[in-house]
Image (cartoon, rainbow, N blue to C red):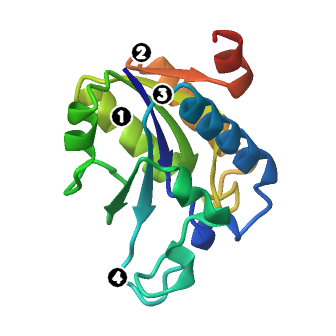
Amino acid sequence: MQALLVIDLQKGIVLQKEFDETVNKIRWLIDHFKSKGRPVIFTKHIDDDPESNLYKECEGIEIIENLEEKADYVVQKHTPDSFLKTNLEKILTEEKVTELVICGFNTEYCCMFTAIVAADKGFNVCFIEDATGTVCDEETYEMPGLDINDFVGSVLNWSNIVTVKYLEEYQGEL
């Protein structure tokens, strides 16, 4: 069984930059999985730091555009690893999930960490590179010319434990 994991599609992240194209790709994935009757799982990052855009008591923790209603499950987490101290693995086991398709935010943190941990736990992982986004950029890392999505996609692909695709490639295999 295949499931979609939508990581941290929250106002506190998505409203920081122009992410319309990425969000549209995620929306397509959500609709596709719903139409096939496959589980759609959202994560919500909750922070205890009052300075964070994802502080537990602010609007930033809300999933954007009422998309939360499309989720079969919402997993609250406090670290980049969506499995650490959450019920995600239990949900996946109960749903008999063997393959996890990952999209969401932030590419180089929560998406990458979760993809690696999921593969380590024995799931077949498909990381949809252009259906992930990040608020960070080349200036954040002081690396001129850095394309974070491409870099993370390449590292995961080279690992030979995570399959990395663009949405168009994924669609072409359906």
Q: CA distance from mark 4 to mark 2?
A: 35 Å
Q: Position of residue 47 (x, y in %)?
A: 38, 76
Residue indicated by mark 3 = 156
Which circle marks residue 147 in the picture? none
Instruction: Please name the residue shown 56% across and 77% down the image.
Output: 60
Residue indicated by mark 2 = 160
Decide: is 4 above or below 45.
Answer: above
Q: Earlier in the sequence, mark 3 or mark 4?
A: 4
Q: Position of residue 156 (x, y in %)?
A: 48, 27
Residue indicated by mark 4 = 48
Give the secondary structure at mark 3: helix
Q: CA distance from mark 3 to mark 2?
A: 7 Å
Q: Badges 4 and 2: C-beta atoms under 8 Å apart? A: no
Q: Quadrant of the N terminus?
A: top left
Q: CA distance from mark 1 to mark 3?
A: 8 Å
The amino acid type, in three-letter code, at marker 4 is Asp
Give the secondary structure at mark 4: loop
Q: Badges 1 and 4: C-beta atoms under 8 Å apart? A: no
Residue indicated by mark 1 = 116
The amino acid type, in three-letter code, at marker 3 is Leu
Classify 10 Å Cα crowding around label 2: few (below 14), some (14-19), many (20 and above).
few
Q: Badges 1 and 3: C-beta atoms under 8 Å apart? A: yes
Quadrant hosting residue 94: top left
Q: Nearer the viewer, mark 3 or mark 4?
A: 4
The amino acid type, in three-letter code, at marker 1 is Ile
Give the secondary structure at mark 1: helix
